Amino acid sequence: MSEPTITHATATQPTRIHEGWLPDQWYPLIESRRLRRKPIGVQRLGERIALWRDASGAAIAMRDRCPHRGVALSRGSVKGNRIACPYHGFQFDSSGACQLMPCEGEQAKIPAGMTVDTYPVREQHGLVWIYWGEQAEELPEIPWFDEISGRRGGASTSKSWPINFVRTIESNFDIHHTPIVHGAVMPGLGSRLDPYHVEVNGSHIATRGELRKPGADSGLAFRMEFKMPCVTLIELTPKVLFVVADCPIDQHSTWRWARYYVDYLPVPGIHQALSWLFLQVDWVIFQFPQDLKVMETQEPNLPDRHVDRLVGADGGTTAYLKLRRQLWAEAEARRDAGGSLPLRHVS
């Protein structure tokens, strides 16, 4: 596997950390194939972010706001290794530093504050990722699962999901809603979650178990694994496996990317077709018409451990929320030690 493309920003990193979004982590923004030379603007993590490629093809991510008059840089154009604002043509390099103010002439002194916040960027696993948090000499690895890195024949998609990011991650652990919400499409599926095991190792949560009818010797076996802050691996059978990567858009919506692998028939070329078919069934029949119809009624929007009453079958969700609070506290401690602005409270 080739080494990931890594771009390190040199401009001041944003310190605006929003409630509910774990800081000092990597988050996926878009599929790499979507980003070409023309700038793209996306709403992620409560910010407008401009994405573009420099002359070498390296991905650049910066706040989508020209410091001159506040125009979206993503509406501009790329000039060699710079992005040009569409309003007055001010040009900024990959570090966010202004290099040209056409109205002032090429020899003009650039004001110290004429810079754009930029983000560290990595391209890996077909996605463009940014590091959201404080500057650090050494950044963590992209959260991923090695077992799917070499797989071929998968099918992927991405959608905006009108649910809070934390609620969305919770739903990835939730297998026991399946016979209740999807019973009409999957008749005969048992509702008893037994056995069920949850293990936590660092920022990695692994769950496994079976959904079975009371008294039955076996049922639907599954495995779910999660790596902070946003990547989930789900195995429904040894032949059906998919990975989901989530990124907050704002407090009320999440960008979801998923890649499915279905390996039922050992026929060359058929894997991708079956994967695409399974993807369509899951998203078109299960996710949006059924899951979303229930989830959009959840309140509060951001889960509160003092409001929700979790049970044993929610072990994965419980572990996730506990780990999230732990990592949040660690991030707060780092900021206290460094004199940075405090984070907002997280339940």
Image (cartoon, rainbow, N blue to C red):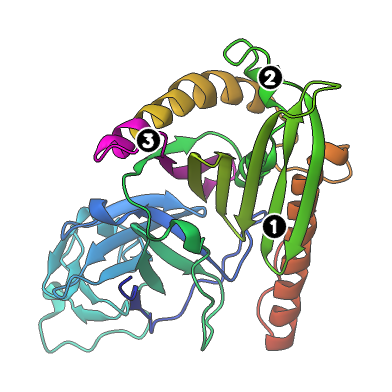
- Residue 134: numbered disc: none
Q: Earlier in the sequence, mark 2 or mark 1?
A: 2
The residue carrying mark 2 is 189
Q: Is residue 305 magenta?
A: no
Q: Are the residues tagged 2 and 1 within 8 Å (C-beta)? A: no
Tell me the amino acid under the disc marked 1: Ile
**Amino acid type of disc 3?**
Ser
Question: Residue 205 — which label?
Answer: 1
- Residue placed at 81% from the left, 39% from the top? 195
Residue at the location (70% across, 67% down)?
343
Which label belongs to residue 275?
A: 3
- Residue 34 lies left or right of residue 171; in this view the side is left
Q: Decide which of 16, 243 is in the foreground and name it.
A: 243
Label 1 neighbourhood size at 10 Å, few (<14), some (14-19), many (20+)? many
- Residues 140 and 119: in front is 140
Q: Nearer the viewer, mark 2 or mark 1?
A: 2
Q: Is residue 324 left or right of residue 70?
A: right
Q: What kind of residue is marked 2?
A: Leu
**Which mark is first along the chain, 1 or 3?**
1
Q: Is residue 185 visible?
A: yes
Q: Position of residue 309 (x, y in %)?
A: 88, 37
Q: Nearer the viewer, residue 175 or 121?
A: 175
Q: Which of pointers 3 and 1 indicates the residue nearer the eye?
A: 3
Q: CA distance from mark 2 to mark 3?
A: 22 Å
Q: Quadrant of the N terminus?
A: bottom left
Question: What SS does tag 3 mark?
Answer: helix
Q: Check the image and report above or below for 78 versus 33.
A: below
Stretch in magenta: 247-275
Q: Is residue 268 magenta?
A: yes
- Mark 2 lies on a secondary structure that is loop
Characterize the local packing of mark 3: few (<14), some (14-19) or many (20 or more) Cα atoms within 10 angstroms.
many
